[in-house]
Image (tube, helix red, strand yellow):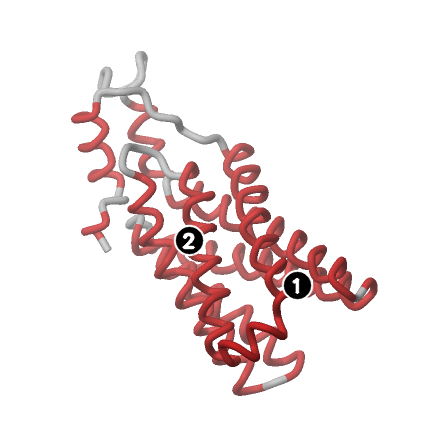
Amino acid sequence: MNLIGLTSDRVMARMRQDGRDNSIPSLGRSIMIGSFGFCLASLCVFATVAFAEKWMYRSLGLSGAYVVWTVLFIFLGGALLSPLVIGPGRLWRFQLVFGMAFFLYAIGWVGSYFTLRGVAAEWAGSLVGSIMMALVITLAFGVIKTFFAQAAALFIANSGGYFLGALLYYSIRGKTGMLMWGVLYGLCLGSGLGLSIFLAQTPLREQLNNLKPGGNSGKL
């Protein structure tokens, strides 16, 4: 995972070479970017379900449709959430990390869903998927000690978005209900992702704060 270059020492090295000021998102901004960025990605994916689900199942089959939805989540989500990451070269690096995280999340969710079925399968999928996502993020950023906290945060956010969104969908039904499910799912899981990426960069922010005037190490 260190090859991707998102650990604090690798980011600090790139920032020294780059020489430009880099945005350091606050907790509030991280949650906002995560919520609205992933909400947009989720809305796009859920829109294909609302308007083209039958066509996708007929043309691509069940597995093909799920692959397309996963790929859309990966590329849209990775691009829209990349501003959460500090330092130059963040887009492709975070795209790789998010791609691995969401791919394993999707495998955990779908595997649980088709193994257990019913509500128990949905809860199991949310748990397994959240664990997989937290594992990839904490390894990529070199903060494996925060794994349990991040897995818990992502599980709460993911479950809240999925189950509250499902409740809203079954109350409204139709295309509007599906779109509203996508909005709520995106807002909730996105807030969890924003918090997760913020926590994952705590060591980097501490190093950067020490390099500010009045810090322990002088300027960057």
Residue 151 position, x and y percent, is 47, 60
Q: Earlier in the sequence, mark 1 or mark 2?
A: 1
Instruction: Kindly identify the residue that appears in the image at 20 percent across and 39 percent down.
Output: 10
Q: Toward which corner of the image does residue 220 lie, by quadrant?
A: top left
- Rounded to the nearest whole Å, what is the CA distance between mark 1 and mark 2? 20 Å
Q: Quadrant of the N terminus?
A: bottom left
Q: Residue at x 62, y 52 (%)?
A: 188
- Mark 1 or 2, closer to the camera: 1
Question: What residue is shown with label 2?
Answer: 75
In this image, 204 relative to 45: left or right? left
Front in this rendered view, residue 48 or 121:
48
Q: Indicate the amino acid at tag 1.
A: Phe
Write the residue at 48% across / 80% down.
111
On residue 63, which mark appears?
none
Nearest the viewer among 27 and 32 is 32
Residue neighbourhood size for the residue with mark 2, other residues' Cα within 10 Å, grouped as few (<14), some (14–19), many (≥20):
some
User: Please, what is the three-letter code of the amino acid marked with disc 2?
Assistant: Phe
Percent coordinates x, y for residue 79 in the rendering: 42, 45
Question: Residue 157: where, in percent of width, then height?
Answer: 59, 55
Q: How many marks?
A: 2
Q: Secondary structure at mark 2?
A: helix
Residue at 41% from the left image edge and 66% from the top image edge: 132
- Outermost residue to the right: 171
Q: Is residue 3 above or below residue 111?
A: above
Q: Which x, y percent locates residue 19?
A: 22, 20
Quick one: 214 or 76, which is closer to the camera? 76
Kindly indicate the quadrant of the structure image that contains residue 155: bottom right
Q: Which quarter of the picture shows residue 162?
A: bottom right
Q: Secondary structure at mark 1?
A: helix
Q: On the rendered structure, is 87 left or right of 28?
A: left
User: Label 1, on which residue?
Assistant: 51
Give the class, few, some or many, for how many residues have Cα within 10 Å of label 1's Cα (few <14, many ≥20): some
